[in-house]
Image (spheres, helix red, strand yellow):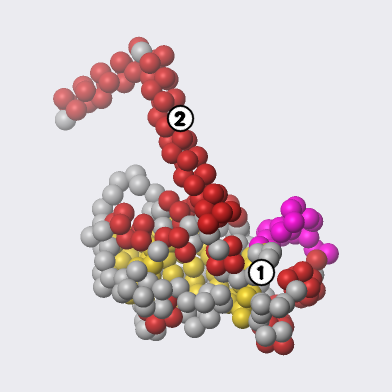
Amino acid sequence: MQRILFYLNYAARNLRRGARWTTFAVFCIAAGVATIVALRSLGLAIGDSLTDNVRQNNHGDITISRANPGANLFPAFTRSQRQADDTFTQAQVDQVQTWAQQNNAQVAVYSRTGNIQVTAVSYVSVGRPQFINVLLIDPTTFPPTGDIRALDPSGKPLRDLFTGGNDIVISQNLADSQSIKVGDRVRVSNTTDLYTVRGIVSSDNEASISNPTGSFFGFAYLDQAQAAKLQLSTLPNTISIALPPDADIYAARNALQEIIPRWRFTRLSPTCFRPIRKSPICWGASLW
């Protein structure tokens, strides 16, 4: 023990004596990390704008969300103090679903959160962030744009991977980082119950420039029926709508803004509005 303390004290003394070299080394490390993040972000941006199907990436023609955008960057520090401000009311959900039925549109109601950890039972790591992007979905309706098919078991639709129990579907990058395979048991924060990995899907399904957490650390799908067990709100914070091919997307957006009144928002960009004294609500629309 004395030797360890001596080594630590000696190292700290050398760092203080060579302050300029220490500062330079820290700067180089920071610059290297920043370069990797910048290159990865650039690749995602190019993919989003040139090669990806925007409608698929958006999970619909129009996506309305009360999810805090900061949760994608700082998931451990963005839990709302008033959870009700970060979800839609049941009345709003019912109105959107009624509108969708009347206009031959498909709708998926789900929640996004960045305050959940998923780790393999046998996984041990010190100092590595494990907060990931988690989507609580209804497997029968998500996504409204068509099936998400698993890499393992190959080609199986997302809706068929959930059995009604403690099931979880994870991304390829999360599986690779912790050596998780289909059938393995994993721990999910906020509950002592173990969950069974039923499938592994492509990381591209949720990885985008607007979701760096999912891009770098991975994501997971859980049945929204698990929300109460995970101490999360049972009300959704995201609604995605897929319109018929001949639909007017601008008219649809205006109609949906009547359901969630526009007067509560201040315009930030062509597709994003910020409510007064409320959490942000963003409208992502794929314009064809």
| Quadrant into which the N terminus falls | top left
Amino acid type of the residue tagged 2 in the rendering:
Ala
* Residue carrying label 1: 62
Instruction: For mark 2, give the secondary structure.
Output: helix
Give the number of the disc on residue 31.
Answer: 2
Relative image position of residue 174 (x, y in whole percent)? 36, 58
Q: Is residue 50 above or below residue 142?
A: above
The image shows residue 184, relative to residue 34, as above or below, that is below
- The span from disc 1 to disc 2 (Cα, nearest Å) is 38 Å
Q: Residue at x 36, y 13 (%)?
A: 18
Please tell me how crowded label 2 is: few (under 14), some (14-19), or many (20+) other residues with Cα within 10 Å.
Answer: few
Q: Is residue 268 magenta?
A: yes
Q: Nearer the viewer, residue 213 or 126?
A: 213
Q: Is residue 221 left or right of residue 97?
A: left
Corner quadrant of residue 123: bottom left
Queried whether the magenta region covers residue 8, the answer comes back as no
**Label 1 amino acid?**
Ile
